[in-house]
Image: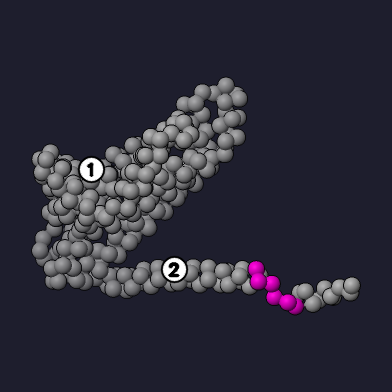
Amino acid sequence: MNKAPESYYKSVPHPGRRQAILLRAVTILAAVITVAVLLFLVVYILIKGIPHLKPELFEWKYTSDNVSMMPAIINTVLMTLLSLLIAAPLGIFSAIYLVEYAKRGNKFVAAVRVTTETLAGIPSIVYGLFGMLFFVTRLKWQLSLISGAFTLAIMILPVIMRTTEEALKAVPDMYREGSFGLGAGRLRTVFSIVLPTAVPGILAGVILGIGRIVGETAALIYTAGTVAKVPQSLFSSTRTLSVHMYSLSREGLHVDQSYATAVVLLIVVMGINALSSYVAHRLVKRSGS
Protein backbone atom coordinates (compact mmCIF):
# COMPACT_ATOMS: atom_id res chain seq x y z
CA MET A 1 0.00 0.00 0.00
CA ASN A 2 1.34 3.42 -0.96
CA LYS A 3 1.76 5.83 1.96
CA ALA A 4 0.83 9.49 1.63
CA PRO A 5 3.71 11.94 1.53
CA GLU A 6 4.74 13.61 4.76
CA SER A 7 3.71 17.04 3.46
CA TYR A 8 0.14 15.79 3.21
CA TYR A 9 -0.05 15.02 6.94
CA LYS A 10 1.40 18.42 7.78
CA SER A 11 -1.19 20.17 5.62
CA VAL A 12 -4.14 18.43 7.30
CA PRO A 13 -5.06 20.32 10.50
CA HIS A 14 -5.07 18.09 13.56
CA PRO A 15 -8.13 18.50 15.88
CA GLY A 16 -5.91 18.62 18.97
CA ARG A 17 -3.74 21.31 17.39
CA ARG A 18 -6.75 23.51 16.66
CA GLN A 19 -7.97 23.11 20.22
CA ALA A 20 -4.55 24.07 21.55
CA ILE A 21 -4.50 27.19 19.36
CA LEU A 22 -7.99 28.13 20.51
CA LEU A 23 -7.16 27.63 24.18
CA ARG A 24 -3.99 29.66 23.81
CA ALA A 25 -5.93 32.49 22.17
CA VAL A 26 -8.57 32.43 24.92
CA THR A 27 -5.86 32.47 27.59
CA ILE A 28 -4.06 35.40 26.01
CA LEU A 29 -7.34 37.28 25.58
CA ALA A 30 -8.29 36.71 29.24
CA ALA A 31 -4.85 37.93 30.38
CA VAL A 32 -5.08 41.03 28.19
CA ILE A 33 -8.58 41.86 29.47
CA THR A 34 -7.47 41.41 33.09
CA VAL A 35 -4.44 43.66 32.68
CA ALA A 36 -6.50 46.23 30.76
CA VAL A 37 -9.15 46.39 33.48
CA LEU A 38 -6.47 46.74 36.16
CA LEU A 39 -4.69 49.51 34.28
CA PHE A 40 -7.99 51.28 33.62
CA LEU A 41 -8.91 51.27 37.31
CA VAL A 42 -5.47 52.46 38.40
CA VAL A 43 -5.28 55.22 35.78
CA TYR A 44 -8.87 56.33 36.49
CA ILE A 45 -8.22 56.59 40.23
CA LEU A 46 -4.96 58.47 39.69
CA ILE A 47 -6.52 60.94 37.23
CA LYS A 48 -9.50 61.62 39.48
CA GLY A 49 -7.57 61.71 42.77
CA ILE A 50 -4.13 63.22 42.25
CA PRO A 51 -5.38 66.77 41.45
CA HIS A 52 -7.16 66.82 44.83
CA LEU A 53 -4.21 65.71 46.97
CA LYS A 54 -3.67 68.83 49.06
CA PRO A 55 -1.63 69.47 52.23
CA GLU A 56 -4.74 69.91 54.39
CA LEU A 57 -5.68 66.29 53.69
CA PHE A 58 -2.61 65.22 55.68
CA GLU A 59 -3.07 67.38 58.75
CA TRP A 60 -2.83 65.57 62.07
CA LYS A 61 -6.34 66.40 63.27
CA TYR A 62 -9.53 65.76 61.29
CA THR A 63 -12.09 68.53 60.97
CA SER A 64 -15.15 69.01 58.81
CA ASP A 65 -13.19 71.61 56.81
CA ASN A 66 -9.97 69.74 56.00
CA VAL A 67 -11.43 66.17 56.12
CA SER A 68 -7.88 65.01 56.84
CA MET A 69 -7.09 61.36 56.14
CA MET A 70 -4.02 61.23 58.40
CA PRO A 71 -5.90 59.71 61.38
CA ALA A 72 -7.39 57.13 59.00
CA ILE A 73 -3.92 56.24 57.69
CA ILE A 74 -2.63 55.69 61.22
CA ASN A 75 -5.74 53.72 62.12
CA THR A 76 -5.29 51.51 59.04
CA VAL A 77 -1.72 50.68 60.03
CA LEU A 78 -2.75 49.93 63.62
CA MET A 79 -5.70 47.80 62.51
CA THR A 80 -3.52 45.84 60.08
CA LEU A 81 -0.77 45.16 62.60
CA LEU A 82 -3.15 44.13 65.37
CA SER A 83 -5.19 41.86 63.08
CA LEU A 84 -2.06 40.16 61.74
CA LEU A 85 -0.69 39.78 65.26
CA ILE A 86 -3.80 37.76 66.09
CA ALA A 87 -4.40 35.85 62.87
CA ALA A 88 -0.91 35.12 61.50
CA PRO A 89 0.39 32.93 64.37
CA LEU A 90 -2.90 31.01 64.58
CA GLY A 91 -3.08 30.43 60.83
CA ILE A 92 0.57 29.48 60.36
CA PHE A 93 0.80 27.13 63.34
CA SER A 94 -2.54 25.52 62.49
CA ALA A 95 -1.28 24.83 58.97
CA ILE A 96 1.96 23.39 60.37
CA TYR A 97 -0.02 20.97 62.52
CA LEU A 98 -2.29 19.91 59.64
CA VAL A 99 0.58 19.28 57.24
CA GLU A 100 3.48 18.15 59.42
CA TYR A 101 1.94 16.50 62.47
CA ALA A 102 -1.58 15.28 61.70
CA LYS A 103 -1.93 11.80 60.25
CA ARG A 104 -2.90 11.41 56.61
CA GLY A 105 -6.62 10.76 56.18
CA ASN A 106 -7.48 12.11 59.63
CA LYS A 107 -11.19 12.95 59.84
CA PHE A 108 -10.48 15.88 62.14
CA VAL A 109 -8.12 17.37 59.56
CA ALA A 110 -10.75 16.93 56.84
CA ALA A 111 -13.35 18.66 59.02
CA VAL A 112 -10.98 21.56 59.72
CA ARG A 113 -10.27 22.04 56.02
CA VAL A 114 -13.95 22.02 55.11
CA THR A 115 -14.66 24.52 57.87
CA THR A 116 -11.81 26.74 56.73
CA GLU A 117 -13.01 26.77 53.13
CA THR A 118 -16.53 27.57 54.34
CA LEU A 119 -15.29 30.49 56.44
CA ALA A 120 -13.37 31.86 53.47
CA GLY A 121 -16.60 32.16 51.46
CA ILE A 122 -18.71 33.98 54.07
CA PRO A 123 -19.54 37.61 53.11
CA SER A 124 -17.84 40.30 55.15
CA ILE A 125 -21.15 41.76 56.32
CA VAL A 126 -21.84 38.49 58.16
CA TYR A 127 -18.49 38.81 59.94
CA GLY A 128 -19.43 42.37 60.83
CA LEU A 129 -22.75 41.32 62.32
CA PHE A 130 -21.04 38.54 64.29
CA GLY A 131 -18.40 40.97 65.56
CA MET A 132 -21.08 43.45 66.58
CA LEU A 133 -23.10 40.81 68.46
CA PHE A 134 -20.16 39.08 70.13
CA PHE A 135 -17.27 41.52 70.58
CA VAL A 136 -19.18 44.80 70.73
CA THR A 137 -22.32 43.71 72.61
CA ARG A 138 -21.56 40.44 74.41
CA LEU A 139 -18.01 41.21 75.53
CA LYS A 140 -18.88 44.92 75.89
CA TRP A 141 -15.84 46.11 73.98
CA GLN A 142 -18.04 48.71 72.25
CA LEU A 143 -17.13 50.08 68.81
CA SER A 144 -13.37 49.96 69.13
CA LEU A 145 -10.04 49.15 67.56
CA ILE A 146 -9.82 45.77 69.28
CA SER A 147 -13.35 44.74 68.21
CA GLY A 148 -12.52 45.49 64.59
CA ALA A 149 -9.13 43.77 64.82
CA PHE A 150 -10.56 40.53 66.21
CA THR A 151 -13.30 40.53 63.57
CA LEU A 152 -10.81 41.04 60.77
CA ALA A 153 -8.51 38.39 62.27
CA ILE A 154 -11.33 35.86 61.97
CA MET A 155 -11.91 36.98 58.38
CA ILE A 156 -8.31 36.57 57.22
CA LEU A 157 -7.54 33.45 59.27
CA PRO A 158 -8.84 31.02 56.58
CA VAL A 159 -6.81 32.75 53.87
CA ILE A 160 -3.54 32.63 55.82
CA MET A 161 -4.20 29.08 56.96
CA ARG A 162 -4.98 27.66 53.50
CA THR A 163 -2.13 29.43 51.70
CA THR A 164 0.35 28.38 54.37
CA GLU A 165 -0.89 24.80 54.12
CA GLU A 166 -0.41 24.76 50.35
CA ALA A 167 3.03 26.36 50.70
CA LEU A 168 4.10 23.65 53.16
CA LYS A 169 2.76 20.91 50.89
CA ALA A 170 4.81 22.34 48.01
CA VAL A 171 8.07 21.72 49.90
CA PRO A 172 9.57 18.49 48.51
CA ASP A 173 9.59 15.51 50.89
CA MET A 174 13.27 14.96 50.12
CA TYR A 175 14.04 18.04 52.20
CA ARG A 176 12.38 16.48 55.22
CA GLU A 177 13.93 13.08 54.57
CA GLY A 178 17.40 14.60 54.26
CA SER A 179 16.95 16.46 57.54
CA PHE A 180 15.72 13.33 59.31
CA GLY A 181 18.64 11.37 57.86
CA LEU A 182 21.07 13.86 59.42
CA GLY A 183 19.51 13.25 62.82
CA ALA A 184 17.31 16.35 63.12
CA GLY A 185 13.97 16.02 64.89
CA ARG A 186 10.62 16.98 63.42
CA LEU A 187 10.44 20.34 65.20
CA ARG A 188 13.92 21.35 64.05
CA THR A 189 13.17 20.15 60.53
CA VAL A 190 9.98 22.20 60.36
CA PHE A 191 11.51 25.44 61.61
CA SER A 192 14.95 25.12 59.99
CA ILE A 193 14.15 23.49 56.64
CA VAL A 194 10.45 23.51 55.78
CA LEU A 195 9.35 26.98 56.92
CA PRO A 196 12.22 28.94 55.29
CA THR A 197 11.50 27.15 52.01
CA ALA A 198 7.77 27.92 52.26
CA VAL A 199 8.23 31.60 53.14
CA PRO A 200 7.14 33.01 49.74
CA GLY A 201 3.87 31.08 49.84
CA ILE A 202 3.23 32.05 53.46
CA LEU A 203 3.86 35.71 52.71
CA ALA A 204 1.49 35.46 49.75
CA GLY A 205 -1.27 34.53 52.20
CA VAL A 206 -0.27 37.36 54.51
CA ILE A 207 -0.38 39.81 51.59
CA LEU A 208 -3.87 38.63 50.67
CA GLY A 209 -4.90 39.09 54.29
CA ILE A 210 -3.47 42.59 54.37
CA GLY A 211 -5.33 43.46 51.19
CA ARG A 212 -8.59 42.33 52.72
CA ILE A 213 -7.92 44.27 55.93
CA VAL A 214 -7.03 47.50 54.14
CA GLY A 215 -10.01 47.30 51.80
CA GLU A 216 -12.61 46.17 54.33
CA THR A 217 -15.50 48.52 55.06
CA ALA A 218 -18.72 46.73 56.01
CA ALA A 219 -17.33 44.70 58.90
CA LEU A 220 -15.50 47.69 60.41
CA ILE A 221 -18.53 49.96 60.36
CA TYR A 222 -20.29 47.52 62.71
CA THR A 223 -17.30 46.81 64.93
CA ALA A 224 -14.76 49.67 64.85
CA GLY A 225 -17.04 52.63 64.16
CA THR A 226 -16.40 55.77 62.12
CA VAL A 227 -14.69 58.17 64.53
CA ALA A 228 -12.04 60.07 62.56
CA LYS A 229 -9.27 60.40 65.12
CA VAL A 230 -6.27 58.49 66.36
CA PRO A 231 -7.40 56.02 69.07
CA GLN A 232 -6.30 56.69 72.63
CA SER A 233 -6.51 53.00 73.53
CA LEU A 234 -7.52 49.62 72.14
CA PHE A 235 -11.10 50.36 73.18
CA SER A 236 -11.39 53.63 71.27
CA SER A 237 -13.48 53.88 68.11
CA THR A 238 -11.53 54.29 64.86
CA ARG A 239 -11.93 54.89 61.15
CA THR A 240 -9.68 53.23 58.57
CA LEU A 241 -8.93 54.56 55.09
CA SER A 242 -11.61 52.47 53.41
CA VAL A 243 -14.25 53.54 55.93
CA HIS A 244 -13.04 57.14 55.61
CA MET A 245 -13.43 57.00 51.83
CA TYR A 246 -16.87 55.43 52.15
CA SER A 247 -18.01 58.09 54.62
CA LEU A 248 -16.84 60.95 52.41
CA SER A 249 -18.48 59.55 49.29
CA ARG A 250 -21.71 58.73 51.15
CA GLU A 251 -22.08 62.27 52.45
CA GLY A 252 -21.74 63.61 48.89
CA LEU A 253 -19.99 66.78 50.09
CA HIS A 254 -16.38 65.63 49.66
CA VAL A 255 -16.38 63.38 46.60
CA ASP A 256 -13.11 64.84 45.31
CA GLN A 257 -11.44 64.14 48.64
CA SER A 258 -12.71 60.57 48.53
CA TYR A 259 -10.91 60.09 45.20
CA ALA A 260 -7.75 61.49 46.79
CA THR A 261 -8.19 58.99 49.62
CA ALA A 262 -8.50 56.22 47.04
CA VAL A 263 -5.13 57.25 45.59
CA VAL A 264 -3.48 57.04 49.01
CA LEU A 265 -5.18 53.69 49.66
CA LEU A 266 -3.85 52.39 46.34
CA ILE A 267 -0.34 53.57 47.15
CA VAL A 268 -0.50 51.96 50.61
CA VAL A 269 -1.57 48.60 49.18
CA MET A 270 1.12 48.69 46.47
CA GLY A 271 3.73 49.67 49.05
CA ILE A 272 2.76 46.81 51.36
CA ASN A 273 2.90 44.34 48.47
CA ALA A 274 6.31 45.61 47.38
CA LEU A 275 7.66 45.46 50.93
CA SER A 276 6.35 41.92 51.42
CA SER A 277 7.88 40.78 48.13
CA TYR A 278 11.22 42.31 49.13
CA VAL A 279 11.14 40.60 52.53
CA ALA A 280 10.26 37.27 50.91
CA HIS A 281 13.14 37.64 48.44
CA ARG A 282 15.59 38.46 51.22
CA LEU A 283 14.46 35.53 53.35
CA VAL A 284 14.69 33.09 50.46
CA LYS A 285 18.15 34.40 49.56
CA ARG A 286 19.29 34.09 53.15
CA SER A 287 17.93 30.56 53.53
CA GLY A 288 19.56 29.55 50.23
CA SER A 289 22.94 30.83 51.36
Q: Is residue 188 left or right of residue 262?
A: right
Q: Nearer the viewer, residue 91 or 229?
A: 91
Q: Is residue 127 left or right of residue 283?
A: left
Q: Position of residue 194 (x, y in %)?
A: 51, 35
Q: Secondary structure at mark 2?
A: helix
Q: Position of residue 124 (x, y in %)?
A: 25, 54
Q: Is residue 55 visible?
A: no
Q: Is residue 76 above or below residue 108?
A: below
Residue at (38% x, 72% y) in the render:
40
Query: Is residue 197 visible to the viewer in this orientation of the structure?
Result: yes
Colouring chosen for the image of the structure: one colour
> What residue is drawn where x is 20% and y is 63%?
246
Answer with left or right where residue 177 lies relative to residue 231. right
Work out whether mark 1 precedes mark 2 in sequence or the reverse, and give the earlier one.
Answer: 2
Q: Amino acid at mark 1?
A: Phe
Q: Residues within 10 Å of mark 2 (few under 14, many from 20)?
A: few
Query: Residue 257 lies in magenta, yes or no?
Result: no
Label tally = 2
- Quarter-of-image position of residue 50: bottom left
Q: Quadrant of the N terminus?
A: bottom right
* Residue 167 percent coordinates (x, y): 48, 43
Decide: marks 1, 2 in contact (CB < 8 A)? Answer: no
> What are the residue bounds of the magenta stretch?
11-16
Q: Could you tell me which quadrant the C terminus lies in?
A: top right
Q: Which residue is mark 1?
A: 150
Mark number for residue 124?
Answer: none
Residue 122 position in % (x across, y down): 28, 52
Residue at numbered disc 2: 34
Amino acid beneath label 2: Thr
From this view, report whether residue 155 is shown above or below residue 68.
above
Q: Residue at x 44, y 68 (%)?
A: 34
- Looking at this view, is 240 or 32 the one in front? 32
